[in-house]
Amino acid sequence: MDIQTEQQPFSQRPIILLAFPINRTLCFALSFLLLSVSALFIFNSSATPFNHQYYDLLRLHQFLLQIFPGNSPSLSSTTTSLLPRACDYSNGKWVWDESYPFHSYTENCPFVDPGFRCTQNGRKDEGYRKWRWQPDGCDIPRFNASELLERTRNGRIVFVGDSIGRNQWESLLCMLTPAVSNLSTIYEENGKPINKHKGFLKMRFQEYNLTVEYYRAPFLVIIGRPPPNSSSEVNAAIRVDEMHWFSQKWVGADILIFNDGHWWNEFKTVKMGYYFQEGGKLNTSMDVMEAFRRSLQTWKRWVEENLDLNRTHVFFRSCSPVHYRGGTWSEGGHCDTDKEPERDYTKLQDEPENNIFISDVIKQMNYVTHKVQFLNITYLTEFRNDGHPSKNRENGTSDEAPQDCSHWCLPGVPDTWNQLFYANLLSKGFRK
């Protein structure tokens, strides 16, 4: 759910009283006129409604009630149903839609990693591409590649995180590509091949002087050598109070999309000999979730101190669920038998604790700007056990290799994440 700025209680707001008498008829006429003009202004101020406009109208009505007690017209259920509201895109259901997807990219998009080309790797069914996310009570704006390219002209879109973030980055590249007539004008700025590696990639859309970038930083903070004289059990130190070295490259971006949390578990930290360091001191007893919470505070400080939030829009995407059945990824877990979204709600997992921490830290930032948003894709993605590569791995993968039930086929589920990213960007009036 999108995090919105908390409104100051009405009781704490100043009340202005009129010092001259007004008869009851005039009171009613004035209050009705003010409400009508205000509503007209709000409805015509933008084609995309803002949630704060809805609350502004409610505050105006409360103000009128204070001036004209008993005379100000009430907001009827019909009126309130017409008031602009922000759509909660995170709640809804998956519906079968033969016309979906609306955008026109295929596995032949040159920016899709070989491991995500599920049909080419042997998957026989293609129905997983025909499910469309339908939010409750509203619709997702149709993705318009040309419009997004135009809005981000001369700018930078930057993805930061792990390989699931790369999955989303590749999806957006391919969603934008159909709006470019000459594919040769899209290229990696440093001549790097598009393959799995540690580092970063910067795809330039020459026609728009735009870069869409990906930085691999699965913890967002630094993973470095342990302090001198550390135990032999310590293979690396995760410095929860220091942002990743790449962070200096993120400054100046117009849009930043972070993801984090997938690596914050015991299997990818302490059981690998990765312990936590803070203030130059190693803490081998620090709980993983406590370390994650502290790293998010480091991220928060970095955003507030290094980004111009009048310019940069920041998204923090929630965790993407995994769907291993019958065991973990290393114990024979599988997802190749799933051919459609989950229908049994009792099989859905609880909200990850990681998401709660991410949401909380963004709430703490609401006093700074509306341009830091929680992009919650976990619930809608939890249903999509059918969308993974599973056993359809890229050529050359051993038959004994585990199934991939964490990444996503492309085209596929990450396209919906990008549709929600696009919708939320529009709702904030980005470069309107």
Image (cartoon, rainbow, N blue to C red):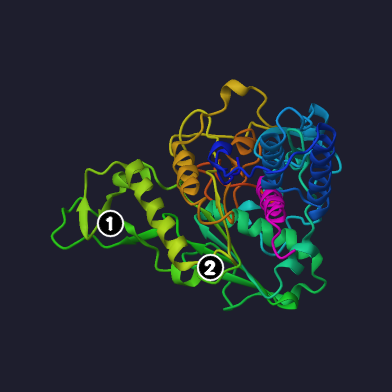
Residue 112: x, y in percent? 66, 59
Residue 423: x, y in percent? 72, 51
State the residue position of label 2. 308
Under mark 2, the amino acid is Asp
**What secondary structure is marked by label 2?**
loop
Residue 277: x, y in percent? 26, 55
The quarter holding residue 236 reads bottom left
Q: Nearer the viewer, mark 2 or mark 1?
A: 2
Relative to 429, say whether 102 is above or below: above
Residue 52 appears in the rendering: yes
State the residue position of label 1. 237
Q: Where does the C terminus fall, quadrant-wise?
A: bottom right
Front residue of 202/135: it is 135
Q: Where does the N terminus fall, quadrant-wise?
A: top right
Q: Residue at x 38, y 56 (%)?
A: 298
Let me know if residue 211 is in the magenta part: no
Region of the chain picked out in magenta, as a range:
411-432
Query: In the figure, is residue 134 to the left or right of 265?
Result: right
Front residue of 225/391: it is 225
- Counting labels gives 2
Q: Within 10 Å of the Cα at label 1, are there few (<14), some (14-19), or many (20+) other Cα atoms? A: many
Residue 295: x, y in percent? 37, 52
Query: Mark 2 or 1 closer to N-term?
Result: 1
**What secondary structure is marked by label 1?**
strand
Structural distance between the alpha carbons of marks 2 and 1: 31 Å
Query: In the figure, is residue 287 to the left or right of 65?
Result: left
Query: In the figure, is residue 97 to the left or right of 414?
Result: right
